[in-house]
């Protein structure tokens, strides 16, 4: 019998966060406007907040993903020396 490594859970925390953050990313997905997004972010929110976010995105005529990308870019602008 072969020895298997222990199975990691979906939300298992990395042992070494620094190397996990700096790990290479999978190939970038392209959006309609040609922008590349190379990382996926998963957060836990309440169903009520999720509903409010979806309603606002619909009212604005945008996708939830695009609305949240814009919000995050506004809240966390790139700083001098960052790579685009």
Image (spheres, helix red, strand yellow):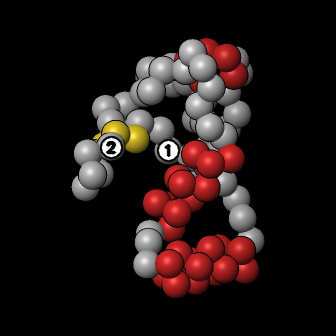
Q: Which residue is drawn at 41% across and 36% down?
A: 38
Which sits earlier in the primary sequence, circle 2 or circle 1? 2
Residue 4 in percent (x, y) is at 51, 24
Residue at image point 52% right, 63% down: 67
In which quadrant is the N terminus drawn? Answer: top left
Residue 34 position (above or below residue 82): below
Which residue position holds label 2?
A: 35
- The answer to whether residue 2 of the structure is visible from this angle is no
Element at label 1: loop
Residue 53: x %, y % from top left: 62, 74
Query: Are circles 2 and 1 on residues that touch, CB within 8 Å?
Result: no
Q: Which of 29 and 7 is in front in this view?
A: 29
Q: Which residue is drawn at 50% across and 44% down?
A: 40
- Badge nearest the viewer, 2 or 1: 2
Q: Nearer the viewer, residue 31 or 12?
A: 31
Residue denoted by label 1: 40
- Position of residue 71 relative to residue 52, above or below, is above
Q: Position of residue 42 (x, y in %)?
A: 60, 51
């Amino acid at each position: 019998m072969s020895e298997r490594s222990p199975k990691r859970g979906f939300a298992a925390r990395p042992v070494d966060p620094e190397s996990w953050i700096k790990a290479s990313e999978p190939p970038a997905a392209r959006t309609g406007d040609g922008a590349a997004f190379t990382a996926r972010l998963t957060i836990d929110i309440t169903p009520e907040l999720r509903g409010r976010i979806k309603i606002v995105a619909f009212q604005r005529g945008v996708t939830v993903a695009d609305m949240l990308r814009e919000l995050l870019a506004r809240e966390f602008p790139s700083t001098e020396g960052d790579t685009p």
